[in-house]
Image (cartoon, rainbow, N blue to C red):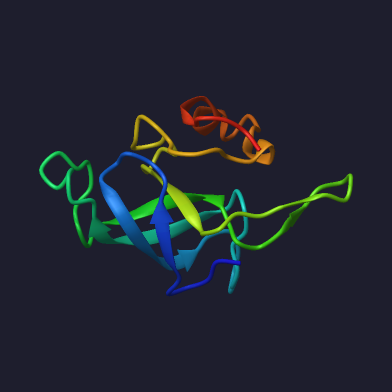
Amino acid sequence: MIQQQTILKVADNSGAKTVKCIKVLGGFKRRFAYLGDIIVVSVQQLRNKSKLTAKVQKGEVLKALIIRTKTKDRKKDGSAIFFNDNFVSLINKQGNPIATRIIGPIPKSLKKNKFMKFATLSAGFV
């Protein structure tokens, strides 16, 4: 469950290291975001090696797709998927990823038509 003021890690090569959730999109007074939801974030910290070549800057407000969460995501067969940390991937206003690569696996549930671009950029599926 991701809510306002949650610090998230960035799992792509856009140049950002950590972001903070500002708003959960998708409804009036919606409090929590889950796997596959889009949120509005502010860049808190940049990666050390890519400060000069970063595609984003500190303090910039962007949208992000939640890729991995600590909260268990139940499947229809009864199994559950969860990860060690909360990770997002930054997207632009059109909904396309800013980065050219996503680090680590993403869940198969994100392999929908809406997020097919993220599936092609990722390393694998869980």
Name the residue nearer the viewer: 30 or 3.
3
Horizontal relation, residue 120 to residue 48: left or right: right
Relative image position of residue 2 (x, y in whole percent) = 55, 66
Q: Quadrant of residue 30?
A: bottom right
Relative image position of residue 126 (x, y in whole percent) = 66, 38
Relative image position of residue 91 (x, y in whole percent) = 40, 43
Residue occupying the point 67% across, 36% down: 108
Horizontal relation, residue 108 to residue 102: left or right: right
Q: From the viewer's perspective, is residue 18 above or below residue 64?
A: below
The number of callouts visible is 0
Residue occupying the point 71% across, 59% down: 72
Name the residue nearer the viewer: 66 or 101.
101
Q: Which residue lies furthest to the front in this view?
A: 84
Residue occupying the point 58% across, 57% down: 69
Q: Quadrant of residue 60?
A: bottom left
Q: From the viewer's perspective, is residue 74 above or below residue 13?
A: below
Q: Which residue lies furthest to the top in this view?
A: 120
Residue occupying the point 10% across, 43% down: 52
Q: Residue furthest left?
A: 52
Which quarter of the rendering shows the N terminus?
A: bottom right
Horizontal relation, residue 76 to residue 43: left or right: right
